[in-house]
């Protein structure tokens, strides 16, 4: 079919759906939604609709990124604005169907906001939601709005028109358009996408490949997963455009096996492309032939590195090799290959749809466009966001993310995963772009942002990353294999309270050697989390080493759990639940933890009723504790009895 | 052991370059792990050495050479889960089941594994049992879930 016809047909169907006489329900069933129970909610919705005999169109969509308030359900009553609801449990869903779909109470108190045109009294506009307001959603524009399993909905929203346009253009002009956009690689290094495409186009050879890197192994990051679950065709369109511009006839998508739903959506989308003549021979009636194959990785972080990734596609151990030759000259099976991240490919599609100049209108001088970030850790509104490059960190953390959980004090944000760094509160005014973050010792990376609060130990966080890279080191080069192990040993020593004063210098020394001597960027960047924590949080290292104290009360070897005598109500809950039977006490007697038996599992702290909050962690602080259980000091029998 | 299933797996991949990892994944799907006999057979059928096949299989975290527990409990140890207390979660699971990551309980009902991020970081810390992701876990809640599974396994046996 001609593309124009397909487009017209898709748009007509989309319009018909929008003006449908039936109510519509959209429910986010991405991985986050499912973890929050959205499949149960979906079942409840279907059952209730059936019970009440309501004929509604229920669509499973991707996630809009407000993961903290999943499951999210949108309800559109004919003639009414679309309303989004958060934390929709099966019970809430049933209530909404009964009261709003069958009645006329939209339950403003449960709503997040109205989406698009129109308003409803008592419900704010979704575009005013604090997490959404500062965002500019380009690559995420369709997530949560269209059915990811319906290629026509993607086409109706402008999809594949970028590719159709590119097909009419000379490959060099396509590349020129991409260059004009200023798009830089979203997988970590930030290399100009247009330049990379050009290098590969110019490389001699008849057979060329394009690869999409969906290895997304950075722990704490889920940008690519969410995009693929919600809008798989945007990446696929990008690959097609790249195939045409570079002269490749085959594309590979290398996927992280731990993200099965995204892979499922991709497989389905590729099947649809075949059905609609967007893959195979003579695509859209042109001379272009192109095919896409999905390759499932097998759980090795280093396979995100481009040369290791290609070795893995070839069915080998995924070990990096030295460059040059660069993949653009000699890549997969020795052929010129262009590899980009999921988001880079998806951005190429919208750039061809809307023009390079349009994209370059967002962002800063050197970092153009928007970037997605995964907000996680100790932050109130966790989820996935997309903002123009150059937005101050403070806006992202405080306005969009709502600051640390429970009003705790912000300590640091870790960006860029194991290759990145930790930035302290004093750096919150930094604009988030490639240059500024690099200058401060961190990186934009692929977009992971994990927030640490006052309870997070920065030495332990550095140890965590080192243990990760040490475990993931492929072992090919010595600096990475042995060096990271030595750094890890020192960090373990420090967090175990056995650190020596000379350890800090030793860490700095090792870091220098590993950075200089490693074969690939896994080793080359592995010391970064240590270096930035040393740069901004040296006092924490010193407290561990010199005072044998963990200021965040997190390192097990350096803390004790204690029950505050003035707060204990003698309710016996902790005593009963302690797996080590380390708590002495009795009814209405102050409980005491026997430190020789305590395994520091923290159960007592978790189970102590919140209104007592009697269990604390000590690290160096002194507290007067009776030697034997004595009658409770606070006389609040009623509360204690209730707790029992 | 029954190698006929393996033969069926290998059939479509014969002579196809770069298929080793996919073959290993399918084999593990069918047998639950990679038995030595299967690895040798794969080497023979793909025209390579057992050494090469084992070399590739042992490189990737996904592949196992021992059978798995009936219920696989995976605790995420990614960054987001780490700062939200996943180490305590893992410890409590280990304590409860009396096994270390990579091991299975003597009755084969549970196995414990560590994973490095399943992309559900926004709802950290997470624990995955079989395919179900349990979000926002605490050690106490995790134990409750394990107790429930234990009970239902016991009633099934009866
Ligand atoms: C250890 C390591 C892991 C990496 N993991 C990823 C990854 O998961 N996804 C990704 O896109 N790039 C990853 N990269 C970067 C890739 O090597 C490569 O630069 C990138 O895919 C290029 O795409 P881009 O130009 O669109 O960013 C990793 C690099 C290293 C050294
Ligand atoms: S860090 Fe645990 S799911 Fe990502």
Image (cartoon, coloured by chain):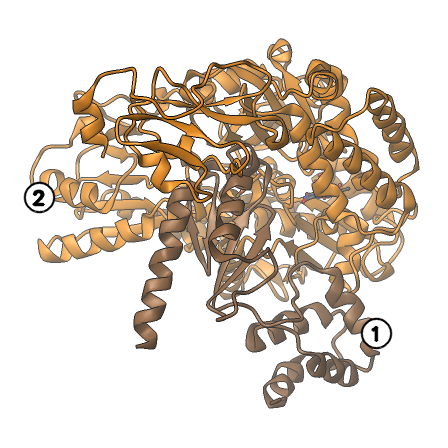
Residue sitting at x 66%, y 65%: B63
- Image quadrant in which you'd find residue A555: top right
Q: Where is residue A258 in the image (x, y as percent from the top left)?
A: 57, 54
Which quarter of the image is occupied by the C terminus of chain A?
top left
Residue that carries the numbered disc 2 in the rendered image: A102
Disc 2 under 8 Å from ligand 2? The reply is no
Colour applied to chain A = orange
| Residue B5 position within the rendered picture, expressed as x and y whole percent measured from the top left | 59, 86
Q: Are marks 2 and 1 in contact (CB under 8 Å)?
A: no
Q: Name the residue under label 1.
A: B51
Res. A1 visible in picture: no
Camera-side residue: A231 or A443?
A443
What residue sits 51% from the left and 33% below the top?
A: B84
Gap in angstroms between the C-alphas marked 2 and 1: 66 Å
Image point (42%, 35%), residue name: A583
Residue under the image location 82 percent in, 47 percent down: A200
Identify which residue, A598 or A116, lies in the foreground: A598
Q: Indicate the secondary structure of the residue bearing disc 1.
A: helix
Q: Nearer the viewer, residue A124 or A634?
A: A634
């Amino acid at each position: 079919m001609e593309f124009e016809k397909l487009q017209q047909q898709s748009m007509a169907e989309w319009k018909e759906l929008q003006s449908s006489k039936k109510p519509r329900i959209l429910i986010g069933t991405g991985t986050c939604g499912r973890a929050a129970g959205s499949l149960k909610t979906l079942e409840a919705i279907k059952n209730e609709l059936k019970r009440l005999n309501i004929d509604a169109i229920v669509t499973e969509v991707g996630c809009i990124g407000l993961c903290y308030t999943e499951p999210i359900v949108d309800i559109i009553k004919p003639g009414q604005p679309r309303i989004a609801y958060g934390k929709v449990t099966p019970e809430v869903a049933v209530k909404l169907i009964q009261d709003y779909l069958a009645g006329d109470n939209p339950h403003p108190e449960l709503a997040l906001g109205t989406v698009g045109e129109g308003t409803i009294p008592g419900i704010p506009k979704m575009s005013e939601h604090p997490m959404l307001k500062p965002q500019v959603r380009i690559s995420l524009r369709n997530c949560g709005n269209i059915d990811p399993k319906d290629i026509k909905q993607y086409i109706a929203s402008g999809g594949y028109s970028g590719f159709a346009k590119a097909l009419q253009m000379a490959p060099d002009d396509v590349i020129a358009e991409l260059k004009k956009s200023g798009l830089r690689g979203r997988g970590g290094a930030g290399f100009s996408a247009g330049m990379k495409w050009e290098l590969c186009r110019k490389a001699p050879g008849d057979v060329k490949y394009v690869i999409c890197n969906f290895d997304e192994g950075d722990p704490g990051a889920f940008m690519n997963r969410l995009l693929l679950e919600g809008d798989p065709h945007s990446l696929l369109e990008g690959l097609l455009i790249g195939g045409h511009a570079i002269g490749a006839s085959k594309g590979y998508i290398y996927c992280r096996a731990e993200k099965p739903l995204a892979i499922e959506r991709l497989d389905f989308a590729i099947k649809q492309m075949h059905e609609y003549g967007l893959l195979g021979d003579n695509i859209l009636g042109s001379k272009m032939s192109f095919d896409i194959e999905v390759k499932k990785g097998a759980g090795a972080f280093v396979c995100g590195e481009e040369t290791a990734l290609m070795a893995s596609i070839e069915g080998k151990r995924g070990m990096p090799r030295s460059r040059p030759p660069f993949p653009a000259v000699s890549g997969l099976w020795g052929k010129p290959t262009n590899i980009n991240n999921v988001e880079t490919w998806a951005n190429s599609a919208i750039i061809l749809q809307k023009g390079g100049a349009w994209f370059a209108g967002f962002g800063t001088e050197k970092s153009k466009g928007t970037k997605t970030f995964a907000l996680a850790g100790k932050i109130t509104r966790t989820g996935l966001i997309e903002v123009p490059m150059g937005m101050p960190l403070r806006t992202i953390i405080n306005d969009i993310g709502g600051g640390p959980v429970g009003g705790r004090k912000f300590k640091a944000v870790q960006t860029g995963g194991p290759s990145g760094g930790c930035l302290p509160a004093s750096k919150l005014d930094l604009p988030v772009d490639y240059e500024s973050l690099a200058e401060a010792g961190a990186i934009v990376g692929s977009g992971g942002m994990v927030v640490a609060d006052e309870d997070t130990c920065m030495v332990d966080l550095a140890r965590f990353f080192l243990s990760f890279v040490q475990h993931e080191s492929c072992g090919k080069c010595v600096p990475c294999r042995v060096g990271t192990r030595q750094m890890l040993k020192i960090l373990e020593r420090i967090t175990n309270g056995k650190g020596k004063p000379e350890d800090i210098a030793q860490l700095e020394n090792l870091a220098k050697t590993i950075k200089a001597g490693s074969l690939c960027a896994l080793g080359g960047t592995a010391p970064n989390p240590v270096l930035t924590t040393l740069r901004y949080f040296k006092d924490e290292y010193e407290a561990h080493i010199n005072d044998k104290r963990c200021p965040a009360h997190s390192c097990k070897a350096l803390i004790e759990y204690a029950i505050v005598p003035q707060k204990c109500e003698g309710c016996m809950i902790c005593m009963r639940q302690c797996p080590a039977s380390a708590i002495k006490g009795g009814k209405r007697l102050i409980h005491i933890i026997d430190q020789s038996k305590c395994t520091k599992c923290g159960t007592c702290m978790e189970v102590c009723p919140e209104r007592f909050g009697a269990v604390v962690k000590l690290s160096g602080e002194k507290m007067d504790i009776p030697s034997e259980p004595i009658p409770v000091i606070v006389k609040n029998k009623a509360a204690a009895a209730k707790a029992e | 052991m029954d190698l006929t299933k393996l033969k069926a797996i290998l059939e479509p991949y014969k002579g196809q370059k770069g298929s080793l990892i996919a073959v290993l994944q399918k084999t593990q799907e069918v047998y639950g792990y990679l038995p030595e006999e299967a690895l040798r057979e794969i080497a023979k059928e793909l025209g390579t050495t057992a050494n090469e096949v084992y070399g590739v299989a042992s490189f990737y975290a996904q592949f196992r050479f021992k059978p798995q527990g009936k219920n696989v409990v995976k605790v995420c140890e990614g960054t987001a889960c780490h700062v939200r207390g996943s180490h305590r979660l893992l410890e409590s699971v280990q304590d409860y089941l009396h096994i270390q990551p990579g091991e299975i309980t003597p009755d084969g009902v549970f196995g414990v594994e560590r994973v490095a991020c399943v992309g559900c970081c926004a709802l950290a810390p997470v624990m995955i049992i079989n395919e179900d992701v349990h979000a926002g876990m605490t050690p106490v809640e995790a134990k409750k879930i394990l107790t429930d599974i234990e009970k239902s396994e016991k009633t099934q046996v009866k």
